[in-house]
Image (cartoon, helix red, strand yellow):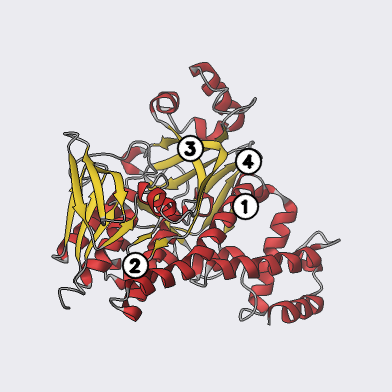
Amino acid sequence: MTRKDRAKIVIAGGGLVGAMAACFLGRRGFEVEVYERRMDLRAHDISAGRSINLALANRGIYPLEQLGLMEKVREMMIPMCGRMIHDQKGEQNFQPYGQREEEVIYSISRGDLNRLLLDAAEETGNVSFFFEHRVESVDFDSNRVVFVCEETGSEKSVVFDRLIGADGAGSRVRQALVSAQDGRDYLQPLDHSYKELEIPAGNGGAFQIEKGALHIWPRGGFMLIALPNMDGSFTVTLFLPNQGAISFDALQTRESVFEFFEQYFPDVDALMPGLVDDFFSNPTGKLGTVRCEPWHLGGKAVLIGDAAHAVVPFHGQGMNCGFEDCAVLDECIAEFGADWERVFSEYDRLRAPNGNAIADMALENYIEMRDSVSDPEFLLKKAIGFGLQNRWPELFTPRYGMVMFQRIPYAEAQRRGAINQRILDRLALGIESVEEVDWSLAESLVREHLA
């Protein structure tokens, strides 16, 4: 690689996606500097306020395989084969994600995975990290970005050949990039927020509820979920409207929190001895969707991860989508080499429609998780979908399976999912069980619309 090709690449953001991008770029021999606002999580505990564990699926696994990291990552993963639905009476109903052994998702520690990626990036010998540095301003005329050291307040002006914005939903790089081109940048806030709680491990580190499932307590306009951790505990997240009779605004006293959980989540209340204390000590997190265009500025800068497409967490695809960004960007570099304008424009062309598609589907999945999973009609259509997949696997895959277990573009999964829904609506009309399905009609619909 010539000095001209060995561009100095500055990455704003050293979280999961920024660290993965640094791995890919460092592996290709580029000189990479990563500036991260937070402290080095390998030396400090900085998990408060952020999801402790995340759902890792096929789209996220593929880039980790490309980097040769999956052997280590597997040691961190807990398989979740489906949803365990808890009704208000305390009864449970397991709903598998798919029909094949490999159709599972994995609970994984955000911090452990981030540490692994930071180490892997440094091991390339081409990546340097600068922690406690936040983006203050970006000047694309001079190719300079100014960072402020959080500890000292001093400014550091850094010259770049290429700038990658991986600095999250509130990205300053995105703001500068969009402003420089009179583009579009907007946040679509959700009128719901979230609070993280915990079900601690039982005696001897035992899991107090089923380990191999993502647990959901759907309650219509709100819900509680829980994902397992390696130490036997579960990270519990309450999703609730911001205002109203049932809302975070209504839970201002210890008594109101206790009564709320006693009424709506009585079976899990007994498993969380620190519930009320955690409720008031843990921050309330905001939810929203980021959409912008363009995602790049010539051959100078590009956005990845939440900086380009922050999504609500209800499809478990935020991290997976960001990791897929990194893999696609690496593929564009492999194809177009030092033609950075072509690299960034092709990446933008490939990824922006998919970012919008998963944003839409994640919002739709919130309704499914908090309400539809308890609806008999939803369950009937899911059973019909599994039946269609069994009979014509080359033609029909449920949309959830396309998103979570395949790597077809999100936009294509969204398009085909809309066709699927019309087929399921037609087949479920006027029947009460999957045994009543007219499979000859089903075949004609599938072959007509999906062949």
* Residue at image mark 1: 364
- Looking at the rendered image, the disc whose residue lies closer to the viewer, 4 or 1, is 1
Instruction: Mark 3 vs mark 2: give the one in front.
Output: 2
Looking at the picture, how far across and down is residue 4, in whole percent?
19, 74
Instruction: Give the image location of residue 26, x and y in percent.
Output: 21, 67
In the rendered structure, which amino acid carries the disc numbered 2? Gly
Mark positioned earlier in the residue sequence (2 or 1)? 2
Residue 299, labelled with which disc? 2
Residue beneath label 4, please?
87
Q: Earlier in the sequence, mark 4 or mark 1?
A: 4
Tell me how far mark 4 sits from mark 3, CA to CA: 26 Å
**Residue 62 visible somewhere in the drawing:** no
Indicate the amino acid at tag 1.
Glu
What residue do we see at 49% from left, 30% from top? 270
In this rendering, position of residue 390 left or right of residue 169: right
Q: Residues within 10 Å of mark 3 (few under 14, many from 20)?
A: some
The 10 Å Cα crowd at callout 2, few under 14, some 14 to 19, many 20 or more, is some
Above-or-below relation of 186 to 95: above
Mark 1 neighbour class, 10 Å CA radius: few under 14, some 14 to 19, many 20 or more:
few
Secondary structure category for the residue under label 3 = strand
| Depth order, front residue of 183/61 | 183
Residue 279, percent from left and from top: 44, 27
Amino acid of disc 4: Asp
Give whichever of discs 4 and 2 has the lower sequence position: 4
Q: Are marks 3 and 2 in contact (CB under 8 Å)?
A: no
Q: What's the residue type where badge 3 is placed?
A: Lys
The circle drawn on residue 286 is 3
CB atoms at circles 4 and 1 under 8 Å apart? no
Q: CA distance from mark 4 to mark 2?
A: 53 Å
The residue that appears at 42% across and 37% down in the rendered structure is 199
* Vertical order, 13 against 347 (above or below): above
